Every structure is written in C-alpha cells, then in structure tokens.
Image (spheres, helix red, strand yellow):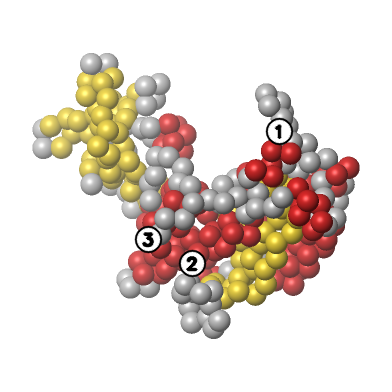
C-alpha cells in the first residue's frame, strides 16, 4: 500500500506524484480508474492506493500504474471522500438485506455479416429465482447460501418469426428444428416475469450490462409496458471488477472456474449461464460474509 499527499497532478496525462521520506515517485491512472476518479482528484489530497507490476514512461519519468484507490481524503480532516472497504461493506449489506434474486440470461439473434446497428431479439431466456442468505434449506447442490425457488428455460419466438441469421444455431444448444418445435410467444416469458416481480420483488442479477439492454429492447419490440428499471438490476460483473480491482473484465465462466476450481467452458445456453451466475453470486456472497461477519 502507498499512502501520501498528491502533488504534481496532471489531469491531461493522468498522473501525479507522492513523496515519502524525501523520495518522490510518480503514479498513473489506467483508463478504468481515470473514468471514475480522474476529475475528483486534487493536489493536496491524501490517498492510499495499491499499484500493479506495470510501469510506463511519461515525460521521461518512469511511473507506476495504480491498481486501486483504498481511501481519498483531505489532510487534517475527518471527512473521507472515498473508502473502498466502506463501499464493499455496502455491497454486502445490499446482498444480505434483499431476500430474493432473479438470475437471468438471454441468448439473442445474431447480426448478419458486416451488418451494423443491429438489435438482437431474445431467442432464449433462462432464469433462476433464488433466496440468498445464511442457513437456507434446500440450497442448490454445490452452493452454500442459495435456495432455489423456481427456474425456467424458454425458447422465444422473435417478431415475425425472423431468426435473422441461422448461424445462431451453431451457438445455442438447440437445432433449428428443436427451436421451432419448442419456442413460445414472448408474452409467456413476459407474464412469468411480471408474476415474479409482483410476488417476490427480486433484484435481477446479470453478468455484464448487455442483458439489461436486451430486456429493454424486448419491451420495445413487443410493444409492452416495461416491467423493470435500472434500479432492479445488480451487475455482478461490475461488482467483481470493483471488488477485486480488475483492470479487465472477467468472463462468467472464468469467475466460476476460479471459485469452484473447475475448467468449464461456456456453452451458450441461457439456463446454464444463469446457473453459473447463481453459483458465482453464492461464492461472492460467501467471500463478503467471511470478511464482514468476522469483524
């Protein structure tokens, strides 16, 4: 951990220096951190931070890449502008205080070769409704805190039955014939989602932001009232990126394999992806619980 006062702040080149024991070192913000903290930093602030193994030369000076900010404050002030641990505790409190979670994943129609500005329609929706907490009965096999309430895996008819690009069947776990034999109207899924939101008021857990936009687009395609707002969602990928101070996005199956010491590969099945997300949520909740319940 590095701690000290910011000086020589250069917003344009995204770096600053810290002097400790008469030795001045320089540190630069990668794009991810600059987008969050860059325009809040000021000379004279006290920061605690971690660094990575990466360095680069800026203005003929070797600089260390910042891995994460732990705290940001002003000297001789009790006011903390940023506290990473406090935010992590807030995440834990959110997970602990909400009972029900709808973990959902979509497979969508594909654009044709070189097609631009294409918006895919949902061809498969897989979801798992769970209750998360300590001492739950009938937890998912292999999980610790996650009790399954219901699940479903639906193939959905796109508008005008337009698959758009049949190459999608090389990805999803269904042949073209199987898909058309099993697919149901979008409103079947819509009514299920409406019932779940009304009866359980769950937080909706997704891995990455794409599924939020996919669901929002589905309301427009099918000319129905939205059942969700952005406040309903928890982006589990973002929580991992922020909690573990990752510089790059982590794939769902990479996260699952890290937690469960496995070597699964993604198979592009909506329900399987939702199940993997549920297990990652369970493991992440366990990590947070071990940190904050032991304090």
Q: Residue at x 23, y 46 (%)?
A: 1
Relative height, residue 266 to residue 30 (above, below): below
Relative height, residue 140 to residue 278 (above, below): below
Query: Residue 115 appears at what percent x and percent y?
Result: 71, 26
Q: Earlier in the sequence, mark 2 or mark 3?
A: 3
Q: Nearer the viewer, mark 2 or mark 1?
A: 1
Q: CA distance from mark 2 to mark 3?
A: 15 Å
Query: Residue 173 appears at what percent x and percent y?
Result: 65, 53
Query: Is 94 on the left-hand or right-hand side of 46?
Result: right
Which label belongs to residue 291? none
Query: Is 260 on the left-hand or right-hand side of 202?
Result: left
Residue for badge 3: 261
Query: Is 248 on the left-hand or right-hand side of 18?
Result: right
Q: Nearer the viewer, mark 2 or mark 3?
A: 3
Q: Earlier in the sequence, mark 3 or mark 1?
A: 1
Foreground: 105 or 102? 105
Q: Earlier in the sequence, mark 2 or mark 1?
A: 1
Secondary element at image label 3: loop
Q: CA distance from mark 3 to mark 1?
A: 35 Å
Query: Residue 273 appears at what percent x and percent y?
Result: 58, 56
Which label belongs to residue 111? 1
Residue for badge 2: 282
Query: Residue 220 appears at what percent x and percent y?
Result: 82, 44
Callout 2: 10 Å neighbours few (<14), some, many (20+)?
many
Total residue callouts: 3
Secondary element at image label 1: loop
Q: CA distance from mark 2 to mark 1?
A: 34 Å
Q: Residue at x 33, y 53 (%)?
A: 78
């Amino acid at each position: 951990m590095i701690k000290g006062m910011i000086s020589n702040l250069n917003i344009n080149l995204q770096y600053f220096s810290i002097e400790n024991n008469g030795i001045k070192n320089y540190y630069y913000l990668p794009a991810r951190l600059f987008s969050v903290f860059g325009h809040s930093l000021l000379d004279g602030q006290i920061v605690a931070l971690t660094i990575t193994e990466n360095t680069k030369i800026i203005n003929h000076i070797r600089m260390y890449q910042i891995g994460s900010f732990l705290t940001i404050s002003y000297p001789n002030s009790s006011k903390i502008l940023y506290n990473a641990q406090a935010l992590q505790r807030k995440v834990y409190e959110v997970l602990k205080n909400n009972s029900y979670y709808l973990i959902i994943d979509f497979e969508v129609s594909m654009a044709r070769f070189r097609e631009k500005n294409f918006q895919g329609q949902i061809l498969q929706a897989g979801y798992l409704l769970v209750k998360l907490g300590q001492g739950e009965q009938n937890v998912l096999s292999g999980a610790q805190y996650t009790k399954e309430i219901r699940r479903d895996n639906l193939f959905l008819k796109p508008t005008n039955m337009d698959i758009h690009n049949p190459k999608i069947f090389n990805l999803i776990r269904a042949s073209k014939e199987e898909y058309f034999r099993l697919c149901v109207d979008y409103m079947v899924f819509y009514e299920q989602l409406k019932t779940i939101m009304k009866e359980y008021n769950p937080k909706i857990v997704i891995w990455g932001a794409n599924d939020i936009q996919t669901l929002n687009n589905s309301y427009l395609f099918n000319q129905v009232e939205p059942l969700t707002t952005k406040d309903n969602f928890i982006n589990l990928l973002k929580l991992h990126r922020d909690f573990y101070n990752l510089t790059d996005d982590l794939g769902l199956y990479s996260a699952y394999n890290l937690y469960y010491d496995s070597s699964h590969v993604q198979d592009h099945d909506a329900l399987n992806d939702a199940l993997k997300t549920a297990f990652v949520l369970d493991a992440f909740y366990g990590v947070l619980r071990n940190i904050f319940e032991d304090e």
